[in-house]
Image (cartoon, rainbow, N blue to C red):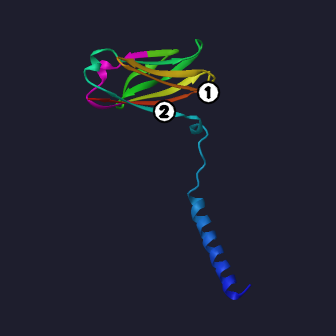
């Protein structure tokens, strides 16, 4: 090994050591409770004429002895709470022209249950299903023209 190769190796070692020091300061441990959250998002386009009919949002659990807790928000405002093993709400009178964001969040027990989010209306049937982690994080984005 000549002097130039040794000097190059020392410089690279120094750069590597400094970058590791800088990188260590930005390390963070993951919150294990957040690792179990599955987020689902669906985008739907509707005309205002379609809202003359009912658009039902249903959230349900597969088992009768299951428990749902949480809430449904429309554009950031809570419109109903999740209770028992199913919840249903007519969204038609609540949706405005433009973008409407429906956030469904909460928990269900036992975690071995499956939960289902459905939006049912004229010419529309959207279903989101998830199972096995006990957390609900679903978003429906409804554009009304």
**Does 82 appear above or below 3?**
above
Using a 10 Å C-alpha cutoff, classify the residue at mark 1 as few (fewer than 14 neighbours), some (14 to 19) or many (20 or more). some
Element type where label 2 sits in the image: strand
Counting from the top left corner in percent of width and height, residue 23 is at 58, 61
Q: Mark on residue 58?
A: none
Q: Quadrant of the N terminus?
A: bottom right
**Does 140 appear above or below 93?**
below
* In magenta stretch: residue 93: yes
Residue in front for this viewpoint, 33 or 46: 46
Q: Quadrant of the C terminus?
A: top left
* In magenta stretch: residue 65: no
Farthest residue toward the bottom?
Answer: 3
Horizontal placement of 51 versus 86: left or right? left
Element type where label 1 sits in the image: loop
Identify the mark nearer the N-term, 1 or 2. 2
Counting from the top left corner in percent of width and height, residue 84 is at 51, 14
Q: Mark on residue 40?
A: 2
Real-space Cα separation, disc 1 to disc 2, in angstroms: 14 Å
What stretch of residues is rendered in magenta? Answer: 88-101
Residue in front for this viewpoint, 32 or 60: 60
């Amino acid at each position: 090994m000549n002097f130039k190769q040794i000097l190059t190796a020392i410089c690279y070692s120094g750069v590597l050591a400094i970058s590791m020091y800088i990188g260590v300061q930005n390390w963070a441990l993951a919150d294990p409770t957040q690792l179990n959250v599955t987020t689902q998002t669906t985008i739907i386009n509707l005309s205002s004429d379609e809202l003359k009919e009912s658009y039902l949002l249903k959230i349900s659990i597969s088992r009768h002895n299951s428990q749902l807790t949480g809430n449904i928000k429309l554009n950031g405002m809570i419109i109903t709470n999740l209770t028992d093993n199913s919840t249903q709400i007519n969204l038609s009178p609540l949706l405005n022209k433009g973008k409407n964001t429906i956030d469904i969040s909460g928990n269900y027990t036992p975690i071995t249950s499956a939960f289902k989010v459905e939006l049912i209306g004229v010419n529309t049937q959207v279903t989101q299903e998830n199972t096995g982690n006990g957390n609900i994080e679903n978003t429906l984005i409804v554009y009304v023209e």
